[in-house]
Image (spheres, rainbow, N blue to C red):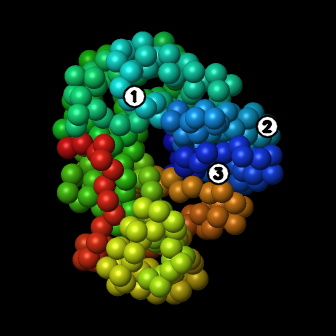
Amino acid sequence: MGCGTWAWGNRLLWGYDQSMDDQLQAVFNLCASTGVTLFDTGDSYGTGRLNGRSEQLLGRFSREYLGANRDNICIATKLAAYPWRLTRQSMVSACKASAGRLGKNVDLVQMHWSTANYAPWQESPLLDGLADLYEQGLVKGIGLSNFGPKRLKLAHQKFAVRGIPIATLQVQYSLLSTYPVTELGLKDLCDELGIKLIAYSPLVLGLLTGKYSEKGPFPKGIRGLLFRQILPKIRPLLSSLREIAESRNKTMSQVALNWCVCKGTIPIPGAKTLQQAQENIGALGWQLDTGEIAELDKQAAGAGKKMVQNIFQTQ
């Protein structure tokens, strides 16, 4: 199963009104037409009264899109390891439900997180369910998310017995979240196993975009509290991002995304507007030089505050 060097992450609760849906259709169209053909979502995105809305809209967008690269569009969804999903059949049923919302089979199905941190006994049957989906031809590829090296090796061995490859692994990775690569060594392991590493939250909720300052205004709630704690500690990193962006005639976001690409990962930034999509696309078609990468690496390593790691990330 092929996957591009760029993707669009979609974890928004879409569908509040038709105008928003139309805007998102335009974003989808722009991304696809410029070669951004991997679209990532999850069956837990858009719950409650908007249950499955994210998958429904992505399915509709892909059906209605008739432009360039249409045949290369890859819809990836993540199946949540809910406490009530205990059997291999529960994963098969979940994927079929996602396919129903998409109006087509899922191209890349992923296990949203490992249960090793709290219910390791639950994980094996759920992985069996992913393998069943692949063997039954219901998906083109399977992937994992938030698996550390130990759990990834175990999963790889489990799938290898059935002759099934792992196509992708998603981890939280950015200049403020290098832990999966620098400490867990997941990039080297993925290279060894032939797995593509997907970087989610590559812009750290907007912290690396230059949009926010230490003086505010800040987002509401826990996110705002987190920004107040992190921003004063990452001045040198933001300064380096800004200087490189100015010298390249790029934005800070584009430099941060290009850094992820240079590290051999597939970043999946979100985009709600055409302007955001165009800015993300502007991170393509060029490459930071070794000196710029080294400078960003240095500032990332020395940052006084890192982004909080996903609680489901395993060893």
Task: State the separation of the CA atoms marked 3 and 1.
Answer: 34 Å
Task: State the separation of the CA atoms marked 3 and 2.
Answer: 17 Å
Kindly indicate whether the residue at mark 2 contacts the one at mark 1 (C-beta within 8 angstroms).
Answer: no
> Image quadrant of residue 54?
top right
For label 3, the crowd category at 10 Å Cα-Cα, with few meaning under 14, some 14 to 19 and many 20 or more, is: some
Circle 3: element type: loop
Residue at point 35%, 37% (across, down): 113
Sequence order check, earlier mark of 3 and 2: 3
Q: Which residue is mark 1?
A: 82
Tell me: residue 171, above or below residue 166. below
- Image coordinates of residue 105 in percent, x first then y, are 60, 23
Q: Is residue 296 visible?
A: no
Q: Which residue is mark 2?
A: 64
Identified by mark 1, the residue type is: Tyr
Residue at point 67%, 53% (across, down): 31
For label 2, the crowd category at 10 Å Cα-Cα, with few meaning under 14, some 14 to 19 and many 20 or more, is: few
Identified by mark 2, the residue type is: Glu
- Image coordinates of residue 198 in percent, x first then y, are 42, 48
Circle 1: element type: loop
Sequence order check, earlier mark of 1 and 2: 2
Kindly indicate whether the residue at mark 2 contacts the one at mark 3 (C-beta within 8 angstroms).
Answer: no
Q: Which residue is mark 3?
A: 35
- Image coordinates of residue 81 in percent, x first then y, are 38, 29
Residue at point 26%, 18% (across, down): 161
